[in-house]
Amino acid sequence: MLAISTNVSIPDHEIEINAIRAQGAGGQNVNKVSTAIHLRFNIHASSLPDFYKQRLLALNDQRITAEGVIVIKAQQFRSQEKNRENALKRLRELIRSVAVFRKKRIATRPSRSARKKCVNRKKCRSKIKTLRGKVDQ
């Protein structure tokens, strides 16, 4: 059971985890042992609330396929158990990220005093630069 929040959790049978051989350097260990984890989670067939499903499917993330399957490959660690924990943690973080509501931005204007200060700074800078010019004799 993967707990997403206090009310939402995913049963283990909905998450498909396969052990595969890791890529990259690692000597003999990488050729013999399947330490990398390939996690697949079908959004449509899951027991997640509709709110989570809609937000996940609308998300523009390369880990989500066109069929609505989240694919996570974890091969950072040398042990299979650590990679499994890492893959589940990344899945949990992805699902939690869609539950966060973004605060709507309110457009603001600079105050009159702020605009006045800006103009005064520009005038002062302009005066400094004109004083650098040639001196008349």
Image (tube, helix red, strand yellow):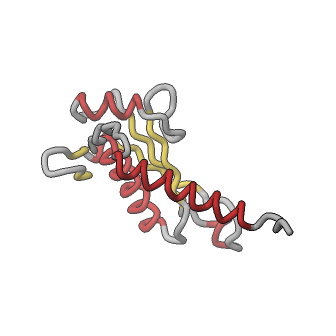
For this view, does 96 lie left or right of residue 114? left
**Residue at the image position 28 percent from the left and 44 percent from the top:** 100
Which of these two is toward me, 55 or 37?
Answer: 55
Which of these two is toward me, 17 or 91?
Answer: 91
Most extreme residue toward the left is 7
Task: Residue 48: give x, y in percent of width and height.
Answer: 24, 35
Most extreme residue toward the right is 137
From the image, which quarter does the C terminus lie in?
bottom right
Task: Residue 93: give x, y in percent of width and height.
Answer: 35, 52
> How many tags in the picture?
0
Task: Residue 4: give x, y in percent of width and height.
Answer: 24, 50
**Residue at the image position 37 percent from the left and 55 percent from the top:** 88
**Residue at the image position 57 percent from the left and 55 percent from the top:** 123
**Can residue 37 be spotted in the picture?**
no
Q: Is residue 86 above or below residue 28?
A: above
Which of these two is toward me, 114 or 44?
Answer: 114
For this view, does 98 lie left or right of residue 11? right
For this view, does 134 lie left or right of residue 92? right
Res. 124 image quadrant: bottom right
**Can residue 56 be spotted in the picture?**
yes
Q: Is residue 66 above or below residue 134?
A: above
Res. 107 image quadrant: top left
**Residue at the image position 58 percent from the left and 65 percent from the top:** 33
Q: Is residue 5 above or below residue 51?
A: below
Task: Residue 114: give x, y in percent of width and height.
Answer: 39, 52
